[in-house]
């Protein structure tokens, strides 16, 4: 006896414009940060953590060497150029430390 196919479920459609992406301003990065990023990447176009490990990777982000949550400043010396992957890894490590501090 043939069984009936399961009823088709209506897929919730994602609206193209309903994104959770926030602008730089909403994330707390303003014009000053944008300028600093341009300057850092112009000074050092390659990812610094990657370079330390002998990798040549294009940097895309100006990162706080010492996170602001850990007392870092917005000075040029506290910025380093890093790539997306290093940023993800560094942010994860920082989040772990932040959690440990709260615990
Ligand atoms: Zn990197």
Image (spheres, grey):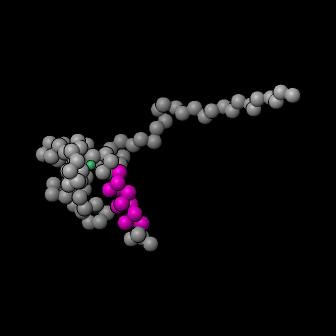
Out of 24 and 2, give the one closest to the viewer: 2
Residue 80 place in picture, x, y as percent: 20, 53
Out of 2 and 47, give the one closest to the viewer: 2
Instruction: Check the image and name the residue furthest to the top.
Output: 2
Quarter occupied by residue 56: top left
Residue 57 place in picture, x, y as percent: 23, 43
Q: Is residue 6 left or right of residue 56?
A: right
Q: Is residue 85 above or below residue 75?
A: above
Q: Residue at x 41, y 41 (%)?
A: 21
* Residue 30 is at least partly visible in this image: no
* Residue 45 is at least partly visible in this image: yes
Quarter occupied by residue 69: bottom left
Instruction: Check the image and name the residue furthest to the left.
Output: 43
Q: Is residue 58 left or right of residue 103?
A: left
Q: Residue at x 28, y 60 (%)?
A: 67
Q: Is residue 102 left or right of residue 49?
A: right
Residue 38 place in picture, x, y as percent: 18, 42
Q: Is residue 8 above or below residue 43?
A: above
Q: Residue at x 35, y 51 (%)?
A: 88
Residues in magenta? 88-99
In the rendered view of the protein, which quadrant contains the N terminus?
Answer: top right
In the rendered view of the protein, which quadrant contains the C terminus?
Answer: bottom left
């Amino acid at each position: 006896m043939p069984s009936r196919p399961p009823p088709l479920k209506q897929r919730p459609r994602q609206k193209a414009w309903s994104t959770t992406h926030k602008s730089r301003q909403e994330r707390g990065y303003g014009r000053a940060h944008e300028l600093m990023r341009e300057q850092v990447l112009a000074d050092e176009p390659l990812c610094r953590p990657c370079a330390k490990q002998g990798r040549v990777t294009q940097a895309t982000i100006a990162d706080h060497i010492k996170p602001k949550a850990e007392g870092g400043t917005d000075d040029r010396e506290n910025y380093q150029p890093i790539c997306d992957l290093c940023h993800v890894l560094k942010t994860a490590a920082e989040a772990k430390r932040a959690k440990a501090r709260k615990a």
